[in-house]
Image (cartoon, rainbow, N blue to C red):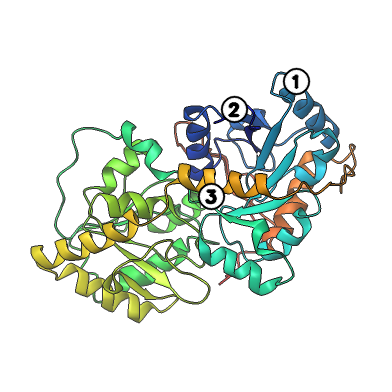
Amino acid sequence: MEKDSPAIVHVARNFGETEELFLWERYARTHGHHVIELCPEARLRGDDRFTALGGSVGAMRRRLRRAQAGLPARRIHIYHQGGWGLDAVTPADRAERRLVFFHEPLPLFERLVVHVLRFAQGVIVPVEGMKTRIRTASPWIPEGRIHVLPHPWPVITAELPRPVPARVPGLTGFPGRVEFRQKRADRIPRFLEAEEFSGEIPLEVFPVGNDVRSFRRRWRRDARVAWRREHTLPERIGRMRAWDVAVYLSSFEGFPQSLAWCVESGVLPLFPEGGGIEPPFRLALDCTYEAGETEDAMGKYSALCELGAEARQRLADRNRQGLAALTDASDAMAAMLEAEAARPLRPLSRKAAFGPFWPVRVYGYFIHFARTGQWGGQRFMHESGRDGGGDRFRPVNRQSTG
């Protein structure tokens, strides 16, 4: 980074909450960027994302002011998690520019884009499909204010366990969090009951996600489900390398990191496409199915399981070519900063949408509802990658969002 260029500061509720935030924190520290957590105490508690949030908006603003005290005067703040906290701490933010990063295409995220552009010069998304959704919903937003920045998925590979586990022929895994709303773990039973799934080798599932307990209570004694012991992110990625097939049943996806890790190691993904979902990079047609169509998914799954070694290797190589064509996060970041520097600064209002006396917990509920149309949340991940535990809050609305 040039000496006269502004410093990059990543801002989030806390960086131990999701895999994407975990990676961006590692990326920031590796590349000389700065990190600010608006609610660092929630990382320590590791409880529900809302019940762990204490204090008021005013206290959050004071925390932001203290964090900025030792930073360079010229700064670009990148607010992750769809700009969580930005519309509340705006009076305390002294950045030269502000950008908001939307990590995943939540059901109503386009609506929130319009809201956060009152407080930021631009927004960031990890895939072109999300940019298209924004442009379709709000064509009046200038294209130059929407940047595409892939997640830095390779930063964790140096920590992967060694040696690499031997691949188990026919072994299938569910790489997503055990979550009903987005990852649609509630579709796993239909997958297991289909005749294409023999059950001779159980489906491997990691105990990470806000619906682990309710799912586990029902399927604890089912021999077709194998609960893995790996909790940390490097451990889970290492175990994925033993799979033949990785199954995705999601309702919506941006750039799931596990997809890149699986493709890199030669695992064949079975990924949904259509209905607002598209892979973040080009996958072989044999590895995609029509989103929400169980019969199509099982037909493709059966075909993948029956592949010979040579055909399997061809598909794996084709997927790797698509991954290799993806723009590197550092190159995309440099291009984004260059584009921002070329645009004149647009003055932003310092007036916040939430007053200092709002409890942070209540603020979190409102923002989550604005993003998804649902009341509810998911537990934090610790730095180790463990699910936060605790089960005191259960979302009211469990209906499908896609």
Q: Is residue 362 visible?
A: yes
Sequence-wise first label, 1 or 3: 1
Q: Is residue 140 left or right of residue 267?
A: right
Q: Between 334 and 90, which is closer to the camera in this rendering?
A: 334
Q: Position of residue 250 (x, y in %)?
A: 46, 65
- Please tell me whether residue 70 is drawn above or below residue 258 in the rendered image: above
Three-letter code for the amino acid on which mark 1 is drawn = Ala
Q: Which residue is mark 2?
A: 44
Q: Is residue 329 left or right of residue 295?
A: right
At numbered mark 1, what does the secondary structure look like: helix, strand or loop?
Answer: loop
Residue named by callout 3: 210
Disc 3 residue type (three-letter): Asn
Residue furthest to the top in view is: 70
Observer-nearest of 210 and 103: 103
Residue at horizontal 47 percent and vertical 39 percent from the top: 23
Quadrant in the picture for residue 163:
top left
Residue 89's place in the image compared with 111, above or below, is: above
Cα distance in 3D space between marks 1 and 3: 36 Å
Closer mark to the observer between disc 2 and disc 1: 1
Which tag is nearer the camera, tag 1 or tag 3? 1
Judged from the image, the secondary structure of the residue bearing numbered disc 2 is: helix
- Mark toward the start of the polypeptide (3 vs 2): 2
Q: Going 44% across and 54% down the picture, which residue do you hit? A: 256
C-beta proximity under 8 Å, tags 3 and 2? no
Mark 1 highlights which residue?
69
